[in-house]
Amino acid sequence: MIAIRLPVSCAALLLIAAAPADQGRVGHVIDGDTFRLESGERIRIAGIDAPETHAGQAKCRAEIALGQSATARARMLLDGRNVTIMRVGRSYNRTVARVTLAGRDVGSELVATGVARWWPRGQRKPDWCARAR
């Protein structure tokens, strides 16, 4: 028998990748890319970034306005709806997950409507103020 030793981070990634999808009902949308399930679990939608809504986190006033629009769109899409969650990691005490609603990818939906941008892992966070200047 051949034993293959993986670094702990690779082994954890394999366990996460093998995790089954779960269902949950959205209890509250926090902002354009984060929501809370009725169970209390906070979910960050994987692979996207929405503008910030709080002055302490946003880089400009225009970002706050964009963030409010993103939050409103996410609420229209998600509030009270049943979603499928495929967990891919953790960040800032939140579950990071691919999220689908009625078979549609929520991240893709938010990007397509212009309220979020793709944010691949390891890349710089999108600059929401660049257009505003």
Image (cartoon, rainbow, N blue to C red):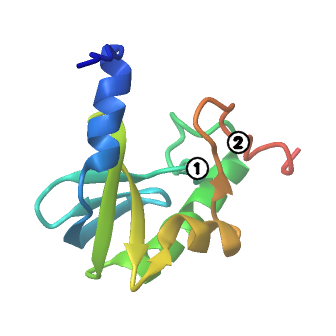
Q: Disc 2 designates what residue?
A: 126
Instruction: Say which amino acid is labelled 1.
Output: Asp
Q: Residue at x 31, y 63 (%)?
A: 85
Q: Determine the CA span between mark 1 and mark 2.
A: 7 Å
Residue 2, picture quadrant: top left
Find out whether the residues at labels 1 and 2 contact each other: C-beta distance under 8 Å: yes
- Which one is earlier in the sequence, the residue at label 1 or at label 2? 1
Q: Is residue 55 above or below residue 25?
A: above
Q: Nearer the viewer, residue 47 or 13?
A: 13
Q: Secondary structure at mark 2?
A: loop
Q: Furthest residue to the left?
A: 39
Q: Secondary structure at mark 1?
A: strand
Q: Which label was assigned to residue 49?
A: 1
Q: Nearer the viewer, residue 122 or 13?
A: 13
* Residue 40 seen in the figure: yes
Q: Position of residue 9 (x, y in %)?
A: 35, 21
Q: Which label was assigned to residue 113?
A: none
Q: Position of residue 47 (x, y in %)?
A: 55, 49
Residue 28, picture quadrant: bottom left
Q: Residue at x 49, y 45 (%)?
A: 54
